[in-house]
């Protein structure tokens, strides 16, 4: 039961307005800002799946589809693809809604691997805490 993937919450993990402080010299939002948001969204999704301390060990399949502009509202949607013994594989889609429009489009997507760790930063089984809570 502990390794059963919980359904997405129906809400984005993160939603944020892109401000001028996030821009590169050409006026677009830095890709690194989006990557940071992806990392945060993956952490939110990991907590949704199991209450452990997690670290990011990989970001794979990162694809930037379109630029993000100042004023865009960016939403990050997460879906857990797999729960392993100590890790979670999470897919994140980054959607942008340009200000003053009803348009929404995908700007970035990535797959992130998160690993559950203990206080000494050693990997631990994801179901370990769930077992303790039911004992």
Image (tube, rainbow, N blue to C red):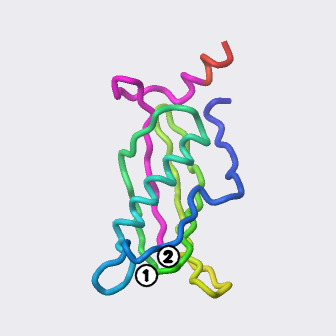
Check disc 1 and report the residue beneath it: 67
Of mark 2 and mark 1, the one earlier in the sequence is 1
Q: Do the residues under discs 2 and 1 have CB atoms within 8 angstroms?
A: yes
Q: Quadrant of the N terminus?
A: top right
Identified at 64% across, 87% down, the residue is 101
Q: Quadrant of the C terminus?
A: top right
Identified at 60% across, 40% down, the residue is 49
In the image, which residues are magenta?
Answer: 108-129
Q: Position of residue 128 (x, y in %)?
A: 54, 22
Task: Check the image and report above or below for 11 versus 70.
Answer: above
Identified at 31% across, 87% down, the residue is 26
Q: Secondary structure at mark 2?
A: strand
Q: Assess whether residue 116 is covered by the magenta stretch.
A: yes
Identified at 59% across, 61% down, the residue is 77
Q: Position of residue 109 (x, y in %)?
A: 48, 67
Q: Nearer the viewer, residue 10 or 29?
A: 29
Does residue 98 appear left or right of residue 123 in this picture? Answer: right
Does residue 16 appear left or right of residue 24 in this picture? Answer: right
């Amino acid at each position: 039961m502990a390794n059963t993937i919980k359904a997405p919450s129906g809400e984005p993990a993160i939603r944020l307005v892109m401000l001028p402080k996030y821009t590169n010299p050409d006026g677009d939002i830095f890709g690194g800002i989006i990557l940071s948001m992806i990392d945060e969204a993956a952490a939110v999704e990991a907590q949704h799946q199991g209450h452990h301390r997690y670290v990011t060990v990989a970001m794979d399949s990162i694809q930037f589809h379109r630029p993000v502009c100042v004023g865009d509202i960016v939403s990050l949607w997460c879906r857990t693809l797999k729960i392993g013994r100590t890790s979670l594989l999470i897919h994140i889609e980054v959607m942008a809604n340009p200000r003053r429009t009803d348009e929404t489009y995908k700007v970035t997507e990535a797959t992130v691997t998160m690993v559950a760790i203990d206080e000494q930063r050693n990997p631990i089984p994801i179901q370990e805490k769930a077992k303790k809570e039911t004992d």
